[in-house]
Image (tube, rainbow, N blue to C red):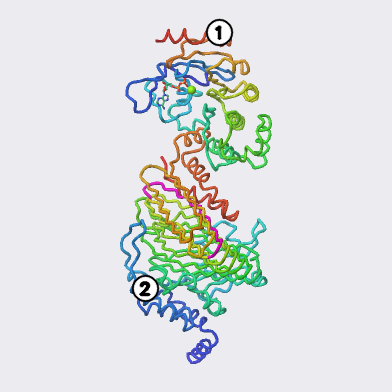
Amino acid sequence: MPAVQETVEQVRSIDVDQYKYGFFTDIESEKAAKGLTEETVRFISAKKGEPEWLLEWRLDAFRRWQTMQEPEWARVSYPRIDYQDLYYYAAPKAKEGPKSIDDIDPEILATYEKLGIPLRERDALLGIESTGGSKVAVDAVFDSVSVATTFKEELAKAGVIFMPISEAVREYPELVKKYLGSVVPVTDNFFATLNSAVFSDGSFVYVPKGVRCPMELSTYFRINERNTGQFERTLIIADEGAYVSYLEGCTAPMRDENQLHAAVVELVALADAEIKYSTVQNWYPGDKDGKGGIFNFVTKRGDCRGDRSKISWTQVETGSAITWKYPSCILRGDESRGEFYSIAISNGYQQVDSGTKMIHLGRNTTSRIIAKGIAAGHSDNTYRGLVSAHRKATGARNFTNCDSLLIGDKCGAHTVPYIESKNSSAQFEHEATTSKISEDQMFYCRQRGLSDEEATALIVNGFVKDVLQQLPMEFAVEAQKLISVSLEGSVG
Amino acid sequence: MAMLEIDNLHAKIEGDEGREILKGLSLTVNPGEVHAIMGPNGSGKSTLSYILAGKEDYEVTDGSVTLDGEDLLEMEIDERAAKGVFLAFQYPIEVPGVATMTFLRAALNAQRRTRGEEEISTPDFLRLVKDKAGALGISQDMLRRGVNVGFSGGEKKRMEILQMAILEPKLCILDETDSGLDIDALKVVSEGVNALRSPDRGMIVITHYQRLLNHIVPDFVHVMNKGRIVRSGGKELALELEANGYAEYQQDAA
Ligand SMILES: Nc1ncnc2c1ncn2[C@@H]1O[C@H](COP(=O)(O)OP(=O)(O)O)[C@@H](O)[C@H]1O
Ligand SMILES: [Mg+2]
């Protein structure tokens, strides 16, 4: 194509489709330069061909971030992160934009295979119906850019929007504009603000009024580029009376260097809507000596904006060197309900500081917290939770149960529950236990033929059963395996 | 060759200086034999069963134990289990959250893997459990509940026998399986044990009372006191003990 002709084409495409321009023509230069400046933010935004308002939104976040301090209250310690020594944008190499599975780099598919993604998900990724008859739609995020989106048609039939958020910005700007940052404000916290400035991609889901999403939605986040910060951004909206169940799962290849991950997930449930968000997190936790591993600083929050709405978080956290994560619910609507079911496993030198916040604002709001922490090796595992009732939250109720299990005597488990009630009718109940796997239990299991590790896994799986039951079936099976794998080397 | 050969076994509590619990115990069990071990509380019966199973709290200071000619004391706990050593616990342990069904299957498959055998298929497993559980009067509901959680004493003992029936061990050690059982439960459990008697299986039945031995009739009876077998005989020895008590042996050994 002659140079002039090409320029003409480009100018035309800027008019019709800014995104395509940014994405297609510059694809060979996939990395932003190291470091974070206003230029980096502009680069990312330009890369994605974003509208002016979003660039401004990012820049605003960036300027605020520069004035903020990294939080230090969590029970985790790690070397200072040099934010100028990281990359903030990386995309997989591709000749063409990802239109279908054929466009996906076979190398990337090979990596999925190496990560041991079960056939079920691979099928889903390839758009094949799974054997169980149920369908799983996968919006795969590889490094920072979504490379495959499937089941679009069936979802479209139901009116469900499920796409990379970068695409939603172009196709549904009004929806994105309305809800982005409405649950986690730009200035919410250091990591969320950073994410707002440099977020790369993530999922966008909108389920229209009265629609029950016809399948479980699933996204795989992968980290594959050395030194690349990961700043996923997910936004899920369930309109009045809608229902959606979303699954997020992660694994990562071995890494020497620490990798920063600061995701933001926002959920909005309008009146009578329900969102179920499940996570299995298995990023590289570092080696036996605590070297390497992912720093996982995540802000996840759901807003039960409408009356009788419900948001339920279920998480199985086994990976990352450091986890700093408090999926929360703002119970704004009357009679709304928030749930948090968590399994957090730490081994080796992992540090976990995780929990939830249940903010009761509306009348007769209810919440339930079941947190199971398992600490092994030299790890530290903290549950940190806040349950609060606003002065108008008449009849608010919470039930919290935090159980910690210690494996070995070099690890630590801590429970830090905060309770604030400004309404005398609020009823908050809290139970907590800390225990060890007893030698008698181990002996009993091993006498029946189980190895040290099998026995530990079995006992732990029993300990977390209440939470595993909350996961969708196929995820629960995987999670169970993951628990065994992550406890390898914790005994003997 | 004898299946189990215990020769001059001395043992003490791990880390505890001095006091021996087993003080030169010898016992031979051949395939097909049922040996009863009787004796007063504290004589070391449970200790013997734990040492055979490989519990780590004890230290063998002298003597040897072989199973089919192999050094049993060198083996890991689960290795012994895979080789066919089964201990029915005096006090079965609870494993909350682990359905009994799941536990049974995990145990059976773990043993099979260790022996290099294939895992059992789901239909075969379900059939096996249904069969054996039915005979022991164990309900489906119990099988769904956590291992031993909320079970009555009798239920726990029946569950031990169910595990034994499913794992089909070579050497069964029953530690006071009769304790805490009423007469009906005792019958059910005894029938379960008797059903498992076979020419290639050996059993050690530990009990304080003769009563159990009316139901599980032993080939040999041994009296244990202060860490030793002080007398051995046929099944009639149990009746003699029932009539005279242990006093005579306790004096002898003192
Ligand atoms: N783990 C242990 N720690 C301390 N003492 C023990 C332990 N196990 C057994 N003993 C002691 O060893 C002796 C034998 O106990 P045990 O084997 O339970 O006898 P039995 O089963 O015949 O009643 C008793 O004096 C008991 O207190
Ligand atoms: Mg005893």
Quadrant location, the C terminus of chain A: top left
Q: Secondary structure at mark 1?
A: helix
**Location of residue A136 with respect to A66 vertically, above or below:** above
Count neighbours of disc 1 (C-alpha within 10 A) and say few if under 14, some if 14 to 19, many if 20 or more.
few
Q: Secondary structure at mark 2?
A: helix
- The residue wearing badge 2 is A65
> What segment is highlighted magenta in the picture?
A362-379
Where is residue A339? Give x, y as percent: 54, 58
State left or right for residue B121 relative to residue B222: right
- The residue wearing badge 1 is B243
Q: How many marks?
A: 2
Q: As shown in the figure, which amino acid type bears the numbered disc 1?
A: Ala
Where is residue A256? Give x, y as percent: 36, 59
Q: Residue furthest front?
A: A424
Query: Which quadrant holds residue A59?
Result: bottom left
Q: Is residue A101 visible?
A: no
State left or right for residue A455 relative to residue B156: left
A193 vs B229, nearest the viewer: A193
Q: Is residue A378 magenta?
A: yes
Q: Is residue A80 visible?
A: yes
Query: Which quadrant holds residue A292?
Result: bottom left
| Mark 1 residue CB less than 8 A from any atom of ligand 1 | no
Q: As shown in the figure, which amino acid type bears the numbered disc 2?
A: Trp
